[in-house]
Image (spheres, coloured by chain):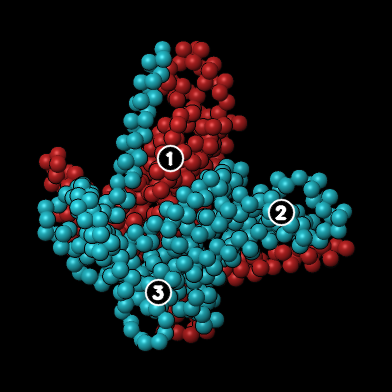
Chain colours: A red, B cyan
């Protein structure tokens, strides 16, 4: 009887399980092993994979002393490019709090019983559902120095706009602006909207009876009640901020002007310079950072959020 | 009192309108540009609202729209680079066909494999069920950056690099879909299942005749997520496909942008429209389910 149950279950599970083993479980194990190896998949057959110990990690994270002209020693990163990519990635993640506040603002606006709210919700959601190479080309065109719509608007108020995507100063903010457009009305807004609808009416009514105005209700009722959702969105944003960010710089700037993110750096190392072991090490360092940040967030959430 | 409420509503509507307009403006700009000729964009004085000019032109001569307005689109769809006679469509129209094929195949694959697995996790009893399910859950955290290199190596050793299955297969198996559908299958009342069982229904019959029909909203939600996700997928196809015959629209558009040093923006915007419009239509058709799917996948989990 037991084996029969297992047999039937296996039939249901098998299609998904095979793919899960081949494209998730095996890759995770293999990637970890590969991060301690050296291998060029183009020049060498798979049998030529050679162990490299911690070399990849040393290259990636390590620093070495360098003696300057005056005889002083300074510490230099073995691969400054990795640290640069990490800096770029974290810099562009600075938009996360603003985006979350904007998502909450949109959700608060939408959360009332008025006609046409569904239409506005759709309008806000469209950028996130369509985000892709198509909208990236669109933003390249909008960021165009002479003819783009953004600089035209700026010209109306007498500002001469920069060459957004070809400037060290403006390329990151430009990508952040596009990501905000694509993000604020998306999944996060829907999650906030769902969270708002779960707040019992009585809480607002009680606060109103105590003389709390709109703003005070928002601060002392809505925001605290939304803390669990906020933590969830924050964690997801951090994960996707660190792991994602490949398509936009690849398509729009090619990673120049300080827009190479860690995932773009990883892709270049693995699939353009064919350093498979090194690229795997990058992936694991990135994963470790994400994992630690998530753990810290959970700890904080457990302390602060009380149900 | 009444007046105060009304003016409050007015302010909210005003705010919403302004915000919606600024969110939608890029789409308007894309559509308008795609209808113009390259020379128009560069020679005439730049106008933020070229719509009026366009509207006047259409009112003056309605046939103009179909004759010249759509020129970029027909030029794009006719674009070819590798001309080898007798091997089916090439160039841009091929990108479109590939995208449709990838999106349909991946969506169908995801719905089938994850609904089967979800059914086993939710409604069947078998030894080791919780352990296997926990392994699935744990991998929800594993990012694509970790798995993509060994997945590529695996496909390469199989000799599948630069084939359709290399693009499709890894995208078909999703822990997210399994998880989401399991949550939904769990809500089906036990009594319905028992009644069907007494009538002699097999597990497969339960899956096909009870679980699936009762879960249309969840299936629709997963289909939309899968369809849109595979329609715009960029990184993975970039890794495993090298010949243009295999490119989808995102790869094709990115290739297109690289070809010209002096980009033909109206032509590129026509391409962006072709890539973007289907996603808008699919979303609007199924947004009810889509929103529900986000809640199922995230809040309850």
Q: Residue A260 versus residue A197: which sits nearer the camera?
A: A197
Residue, x 53% and y 75% (percent of image)? B165
Q: Quadrant of the N terminus of chain A?
A: bottom right
Q: Nearer the viewer, mark 2 or mark 1?
A: 1
Query: Residue drawn 34% across and 35% down?
Result: B17
Report the residue at 14% width, 39% height from top.
Answer: A157
- Residue that label 1 marks: A119
Quick one: SS at disc 1? helix
How far from the left and from the top, in percent, is residue A11? 74, 67
Q: Chain of mark 3?
A: B
Dividing the picture into quarters, in which one does residue A256 lie?
A: bottom left
Identified at 30% across, 74% down, the residue is B79
Q: Position of residue A297 (x, y in %)?
A: 51, 42
Q: Residues within 10 Å of mark 2 (few under 14, many from 20)?
A: many
Residue A100 pos. (x, y %): 41, 39
The reply to whether dot 2 and dot 3 touch (C-beta < 8 Å) is no
SS state under label 2: helix
State the mark number for residue B42: none
Q: Which residue is mark 2?
A: B211
Q: Mark 2 to mark 1: distance in Å?
A: 32 Å
Residue B281 visible here: yes
Residue annotated with mark 3: B94
């Amino acid at each position: 009887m037991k084996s029969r149950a297992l047999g039937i279950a296996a039939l249901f599970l098998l299609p998904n399980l095979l793919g899960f083993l081949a494209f998730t479980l095996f890759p995770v194990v293999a990637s970890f092993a590969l991060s301690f190896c050296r291998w060029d998949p183009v020049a060498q057959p798979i049998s030529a994979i050679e162990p490299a110990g911690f070399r990849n990690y040393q290259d990636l994270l390590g620093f070495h002393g360098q003696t300057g002209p005056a005889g002083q020693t300074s510490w230099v990163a073995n691969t400054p490019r990795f640290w640069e990519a990490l800096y770029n990635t974290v810099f562009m993640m600075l938009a996360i709090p603003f985006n979350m506040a904007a998502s909450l603002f949109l959700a608060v606006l939408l959360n009332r019983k008025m006609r046409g709210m569904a239409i506005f919700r759709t309008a806000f959601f469209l950028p996130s559902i369509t985000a892709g190479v198509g909208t990236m080309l669109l933003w390249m065109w909008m960021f165009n120095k002479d003819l783009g719509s953004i600089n035209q608007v700026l010209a109306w108020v007498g500002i001469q706009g920069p060459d957004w995507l070809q400037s060290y100063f403006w390329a990151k903010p430009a990508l952040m602006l596009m990501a905000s457009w694509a993000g604020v009305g998306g999944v996060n807004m829907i999650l906030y909207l769902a969270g708002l609808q779960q707040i019992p009416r009585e809480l607002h009514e009680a606060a109103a009876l105590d003389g709390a105005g709109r703003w005070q209700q928002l601060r002392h009722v809505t925001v605290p009640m939304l803390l669990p959702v906020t933590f969830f969105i924050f964690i997801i944003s951090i994960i996707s901020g660190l792991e994602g960010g490949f398509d936009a710089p690849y398509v729009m700037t090619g990673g120049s002007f300080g827009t190479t993110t860690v995932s773009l750096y990883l892709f270049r190392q693995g699939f353009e310079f064919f350093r498979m072991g090194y690229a795997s090490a990058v992936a694991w360092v990135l994963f470790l950072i994400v994992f630690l940040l998530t753990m810290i967030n959970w700890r904080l959430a457990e302390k602060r959020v009380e149900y | 009192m009444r007046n105060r409420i009304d003016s409050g509503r007015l302010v909210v509507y005003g705010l919403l309108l302004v915000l919606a307009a600024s969110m939608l403006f890029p789409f308007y700009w894309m559509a308008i540009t795609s209808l113009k000729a390259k020379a128009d964009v560069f020679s005439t004085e730049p106008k933020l609202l070229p719509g009026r000019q366009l509207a006047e032109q259409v009112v003056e001569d309605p046939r103009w729209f179909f004759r010249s307005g759509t020129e970029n689109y027909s030029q794009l769809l006719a674009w070819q680079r590798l001309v080898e006679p007798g091997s089916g469509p090439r160039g841009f129209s091929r990108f479109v066909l590939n995208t449709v094929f990838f999106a349909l195949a991946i969506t169908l694959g995801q719905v089938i494999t994850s609904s089967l697995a979800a059914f086993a996790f939710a409604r069947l009893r078998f030894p080791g069920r919780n352990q296997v399910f926990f392994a699935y859950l744990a991998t929800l955290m594993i990012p694509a950056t970790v798995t993509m290199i060994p997945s590529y190596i695996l496909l390469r050793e199989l000799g599948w690099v630069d084939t359709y299955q290399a693009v499709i297969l890894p995208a078909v198996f999703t822990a997210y879909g399994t998880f989401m559908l399991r949550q939904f299958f769990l809500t089906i009342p036990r009594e319905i299942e028992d009644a069907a069982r007494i009538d002699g229904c097999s597990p497969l019959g339960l899956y096909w005749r009870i679980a699936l029909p009762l879960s249309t909203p969840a299936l629709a939600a997963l289909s939309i997520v899968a369809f849109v996700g595979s329609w715009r997928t960029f990184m993975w196809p970039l890794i495993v496909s090298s010949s243009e015959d295999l490119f989808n629209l995102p790869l094709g558009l990115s290739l297109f942008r690289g070809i010209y040093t002096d980009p033909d923006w109206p032509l590129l915007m026509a391409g962006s429209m072709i890539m973007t419009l289907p996603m808008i239509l699919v979303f609007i058709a199924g947004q009810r389910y889509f929103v529900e799917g986000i809640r199922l996948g995230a809040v309850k989990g």
